[in-house]
Image (cartoon, rainbow, N blue to C red):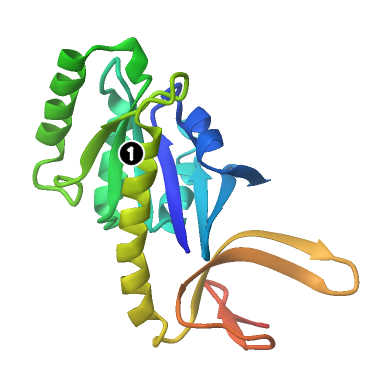
Amino acid sequence: MANVSIIGSERSGRTSLATKLGKKGTESDITLYNFVKGNDIYSFVDAIGYPSSIKSLINAINLSDIALVCIPATGLNSQVGECIVALDLLGNKRGLFIITMADKSNPMALSELTEKIKAITKGTNLEKWESVPVSTTTFEGLETLKEKIFALAEEVKKTNAALNELPPRIMVDHFFNVTGIGTVVLGTVIQGTIKMHDQFTLFPVKRPAE
């Protein structure tokens, strides 16, 4: 299993990309798109509330093992810069830069944009991330992108195998009330293994939960 955030500037085509990568699921200030490949489940997290809400961006990044930073072929802007800074500060080490709407550009312009991305990410956690030109209109680069995501997910799987031995921690992103049951939460297990009726502590309020 791997969680993949899809972030980037407004009108960068990130939601169009998400719809090509998975089936739409839960929606709030982030939208989940799910895809199953064999025994592996991929959840793509679209930060639809960003840039209006920085919370949407941070939630998407915190939930993800892999980040896709969508940059339109027209070039970089301040919102892309915010995404890069956030990823670096939060320590995300796996991801790809997606040059969207590649069908509206040309090879020379795409190459120049790739070099600019390398220049602004030098010295950050993102400096070795690849850039992948993609078009959701012509489907150019989509299969290449999927293969790169699957390869990164294999790295995540190896890392998570070691985390399974640690005490469980869950990142909660949604909650709702169910009559006769109580409050139900949805989230991501970021380490350890959970079982029915396990006892947890809810932070930052330090309340017990099951």
Q: Quadrant of residue 206?
A: bottom right
Q: Is residue 24 visible?
A: yes
**Apparent side of residue 96 relative to residue 170 in the rendered image (left or right):** left
Q: Quadrant of residue 113?
A: top left
Q: Position of residue 167 (x, y in %)?
A: 44, 86
Q: Position of residue 170 (x, y in %)?
A: 52, 72
Other residues around mark 1 within 10 Å, as few (<14) / some (14–19) / many (≥20):
few
Question: Relative to 65, is 46 above or below?
Answer: above
Seen at 27% across and 40% down, the residue is 84
Q: Position of residue 186 (x, y in %)?
A: 64, 63
Q: Amino acid at mark 1?
A: Thr
Seen at 42% across and 56% down, the residue is 64
Between 88 and 137, which is closer to the camera in this rendering?
137
**Apparent side of residue 162 relative to residue 54 in the rendered image (left or right):** left
- Number of labels in the image equals 1
Q: Which residue is mark 1?
A: 144
Q: Is residue 28 visible?
A: no
Between 88 and 36, which is closer to the camera in this rendering?
36
Between 46 and 142, which is closer to the camera in this rendering?
142
Seen at 41% across and 51% down, the residue is 61
**Apparent side of residue 18 relative to residue 72 in the rendered image (left or right):** right
**Apparent side of residue 89 relative to residue 70 in the rendered image (left or right):** left
Question: Relative to 109, is 39 above or below?
Answer: below
